[in-house]
Image (cartoon, rainbow, N blue to C red):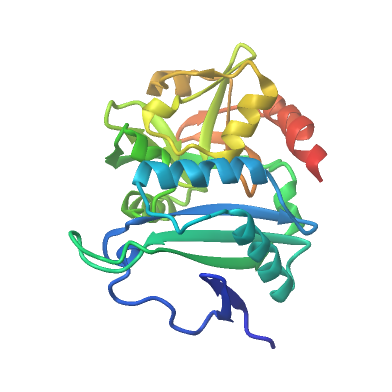
Amino acid sequence: MTARKICHNGTYKNESEPIIRAGNKSYRYGDGFFETLKVWKGAILFETYHQKRIEKSLDILQYARPAHFSITPIFSQVIQLCEKNGCVHAARVRLSFSHGNGGLFDGDDQLQYIIEAWPLEPANNHFNENGLVTGFFREIKKSCDSYANIKSASALLYTVAANYSRLHQWNDCIIWNQRENICETIIANLFWIKDNRIYTPALTEGCVDGVMRSFLIDQIGTVTETPCRTEDLLGADEVFLTNAIRGIRWVKSIEEVNYKGNLSRELHQQYIQSLF
């Protein structure tokens, strides 16, 4: 069996090869961020949205960029890597950026990146008819600053929440911010529906600036971005989650509260299923 490849700063290597130094700032301090991309039939879905978010993340983190830096060649390497790994028809890709090697007050500050690619089952394009079972994660609260909108390599909150979710046999769990409002889930942005109106937490509430979130807000045109109190969510008619890989996923229950999925299914058919 051919060894799976990764791409490190434009060079393709076997994934088993060591590629980062012990002084890598993303490894040492979580000083990095990543994009999760979906490749379908040889193209990156929502490429413009991903490019915009990468550039925004670089600006917020004040990362030094090489002269004439462009994300376009990196996106080309994403497709090339998928071809090498035999998954160019349907793939999940992680594109990770870090800010070089060194300590907190010194270092080379050289932008580095790693691309990983895995086959993606077509079932990820379908609506989840059985619904998700979820609950609340109460132990760690997320901040509400602009850094919270980045898909940060510093992911302790999410790894602890994922362990908590597995312990309770949930599919995902809901995260609060420091204002005691609903923020997002471990791997998705959150929307709720009440009286046929669609809502989602505002970016100022600390949620990740999700690509699928942005796409749906642009496409639907009537989504209200607002703080989400616990009672808003528990009193909703429907709840659904979004991310770039799975599109829209209907939430069947949050702990003891059950939800319908009719409008969530319609939204999936209109805005997600039509892509495939």
Image side of residue 182 versus residue 275, left or right: left
Name the residue: 32% across, 69% down. 24
* Residue nearer the viewer, 51 or 2: 51
**In the image, is residue 10 above or below residue 91?**
below
Name the residue: 58% across, 40% down. 211
Question: In which quadrant of the rendered image does the N terminus lie?
Answer: bottom right
Q: Residue furthest left?
A: 105
Q: Tell me if residue 251 can be seen.
A: no
* Residue nearer the viewer, 30 or 266: 30
x, y percent for residue 88: 75, 65
x, y percent for residue 119: 69, 66
**In the image, is residue 21 above or below residue 32?**
below
x, y percent for residue 58: 43, 47
Quarter-of-image position of residue 250: top right
Name the residue: 66% across, 53% down. 38
Q: Residue furthest top?
A: 195
x, y percent for residue 151: 44, 47
Q: Tell me if residue 221 can be seen.
A: yes
Q: Residue furthest front?
A: 67
* Residue nearer the viewer, 213 or 168: 213
Image side of residue 20 versus residue 187, left or right: left
Image side of residue 123 versus residue 191, left or right: right
